Amino acid sequence: MNLRGEKYVRFDDCSSEKSFSLDRHWIRGMFRLRKPSLNSIVDGIREGFDRASEMIKGLRKWLSSRKPPPPKINRPRSNTKKRILDPQGPFLQRWNKIFVLSCIIAVALDPLFFYIPVIDGSRFCLSLHKNVEIAACVLRSFVDVFYIFHILLQFRTGFIAPSSRVFGRGELVEDSKAIAKRYLCFYFIIDILSILPLPQ
């Protein structure tokens, strides 16, 4: 009698070799394992390429059959939109250096105008030296062309709004009317007075 209440189970002994051999035969019969040949590998690769080319052809047909979306009515046209330059951009940084150099040349050319009037000793009168006059006028007019180009660029150069400078870098104003209004109110008169051909 089992006083402790333990339960025992007895298993039947099976030879593990028999079960293993049965499993191997069953697997071989089920899947028919065999070595792949070179021809079967090449055929599989060829079938894969054929399927991929069929998928690409189908994708091309699908993309060509799709109609482009209708144009939006409120979209601004690229022809009417004027390009606004960034004041921190590389083009304006280079242009500012060229402009400062041209201003230095203009200031250096201005004393040439004092050498244009000459005293004629034989007639005892004041006359003009023609060669110096032509050279000074041509050089000064050439430098003024740079200044005119600078004025035109000012109408296309954006500026940072003073109200947005408090927080971080600031917001760039790209409205051409606001840019023109700001330039006309502050710097345009000084630039026009600078470019007037008074020395010429």
Image: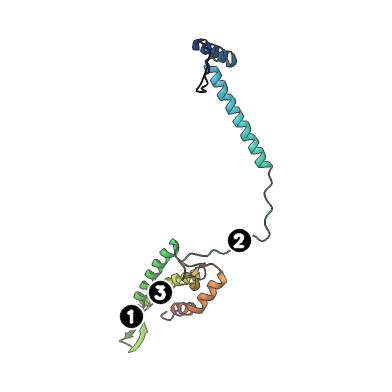
Q: Which residue is mark 1?
A: 115
Upstream in sequence: badge 3 or badge 1: 1
At 56% from the left and 18% from the top, the residue drawn is 40
Upstream in sequence: badge 2 or badge 1: 2
- Cα–Cα span, label 2 and label 3: 36 Å
Depicted 120 relative to depicted 34: above or below: below
* Viewer-nearest residue: 28 or 125: 28
Left or right of residue 76, residue 174 in this image: left
Mark 1 secondary-structure assignment: helix
Left or right of residue 111, residue 170 in this image: right
- Mark 3 in CB contact with mark 1 (< 8 angstroms): no
Which mark lies nearer to you, 2 or 3?
A: 2
- Cα–Cα span, label 2 and label 1: 51 Å
- Give the class, few, some or many, for how many residues have Cα within 10 Å of label 2's Cα (few <14, many ≥20): few
Q: Which residue is mark 2?
A: 79
Q: Which amino acid, by three-letter code, is at mark 2?
A: Asn
- Quarter-of-image position of residue 107: bottom left
At 50% from the left and 75% from the top, the residue drawn is 183
Q: Which residue is mark 3?
A: 140
Mark 2 secondary-structure assignment: loop
* Viewer-nearest residue: 183 or 15: 15
- Cα–Cα span, label 3 and label 1: 14 Å
Upstream in sequence: badge 2 or badge 3: 2
Q: Which amino acid, by three-letter code, is at mark 3?
A: Arg
